[in-house]
Image (cartoon, rainbow, N blue to C red):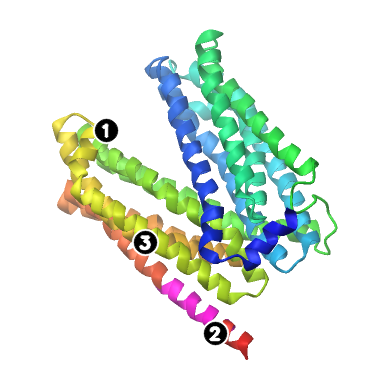
Amino acid sequence: MKSTRLEQLEKEAMAPLVLRLAVPTIVGLCVSAAYQLLNAFFVGRLGAQAVAALAITFPITMILTLIGQAVGTGTASSMARSLGRHDHASAAAFALTAIGLGLSIAILASGCIATSISVLLAWFGASENTLPYAIEYLRPLLFAQVLLVFNMICGFIVRAEGNTSISMITQIVAFALNAVLDPLLIFGLDLGIAGAGFATLVAQAAAAAVYVWHFATARSVVTLGDHSTIGPLERIRVILTVGGPSALATMISIGGMWLLNSTAATFGDDTLAGVGVATRLLSIVALPISGLCIGAQSAIGYNIGAGRSDRVRQALAVILSLSLAFSSMCALVGIAQSRALAAWFVSDTSAVAVAEHAIAAFLTAFVCFPAMAVTITLLQAKGEGAQASLLAITRHGLFLMPLLLVLPRWLGVSGLIISPVLSEAAAGLTAMLVLYREWRRLSREERSLRV
């Protein structure tokens, strides 16, 4: 079974291979998004202060999540290329190094947060009323976040092997346990918001147990161990060279979204609500494309390592075609049904009006997103993390933030809505130019191999 997965990465027809890898990843991402909604639903029954506590603790938990993203992204890229070269020892060593590195950083970060928890929460905006709720929730959640980092890294490892199903299973296990434990602990045992933190802790522990079982029973393609000729410090450097800039790009994206919301708030609550609805809807429809790219990255990385430029181009063509078809469908729905979609999320007339225009504009610009997502996936698979991150930063850092500082002042709410549209178009065009360059390079490599 283990060798079969690698043979599929090297020989299976690309379209069915991409779909087989991507579907479990897409399901997993959707399940993770559903967990956030589920948690907010149950905590919301405790009142406004509990909901505020969730918002206040989010930046802290995001810091720990970025650790998993940084280490996992770099590991998946390095492992896939090592497997493509049939260097299983290096792939196994990268996996082991990633788990040790990620857990060490997560434990250290969680410990530092725990020792100054009140100060940090107050700095992030906790009032005297919300601070006790935030502390109750965050204490068990810090342990859960360490396990989450472990689970994220393991998810990247198994996806690099072409086994996206086990990653999906762990996310479903965690979601199912949360769905059961949230009401039981919050209301049944009367633990309040702390119950939500403990529910997450148990759910992440169960998911971690699935991964431990997976590796311990030799179901993984690689057997965790350090038999590589590459030293541990060099492996850490390689991992963070790809993963570190990726986490930085994510932080800048979060900053861009914060600036969008804070600028919208200057025009009133209705504008903030309308723009917020559009951005949340955009984040939901982006999940399938993100899952498609994440799931298929192992096929791209493996064939880069194997020197199969022809299969890399086939993978890119399949991913880009599917992504463009989906984003175009979303754009058509956004244009035709923008008012109905807006009315589904908000009821106030003025908020619906803003949301209607924002949804139509944002989903129309969404057709530019596939070029960005596919190009970043290719660059990360090649191990060119800095280039991938520079490209990712253009979307919010280079284009969106400056536009938000200028256009809303000139054009009001219209300028606020136009800014993300222009940002997506400019970032998409930049990505297309980079992708064209990479495509020509792959073509030259393919021709040289034929000769």
- Nearer mark to the viewer, of 1 and 3: 3
Which residue is rendered at x = 78% and y = 55% of the image?
93
What residue span does the magenta drawing correspond to? 433-445
Q: Which residue is mark 2?
A: 444
Left or right, 204 with respect to 290, comes to right
Location of residue 419 with respect to 61 vertically, above or below: below
User: Looking at the picture, how far across and down is residue 206, in whole percent?
Assistant: 66, 29
Quadrant position of residue 143: top right
Ranked by sequence position, the earlier of labels 2 and 3 is: 3
Identify residue type, mark 3.
Leu
Residue 261 — which label? none
Location of residue 3 with respect to 108 vertically, above or below: below
User: Given contact means CB atoms under 8 Å apart, are the residues at marks 2 and 3 in contact?
Assistant: no
- Under circle 1, the secondary element is helix
Q: Which residue is mark 1?
A: 345
- Under circle 3, the secondary element is helix
Q: Which residue is mark 3?
A: 324
Q: Label 2 to label 3, Cα distance in Å? A: 25 Å
Identify residue type, mark 1.
Phe
Which residue is rendered at x = 21% and y = 44% of the image?
338
Q: Residues within 10 Å of mark 3 (few under 14, many from 20)?
A: some
Q: Quadrant of the C terminus?
A: bottom right
Left or right, 383 with respect to 179, comes to right
Which residue is rendered at x = 38% and y = 45% of the image?
283
Identify residue type, mark 2.
Arg
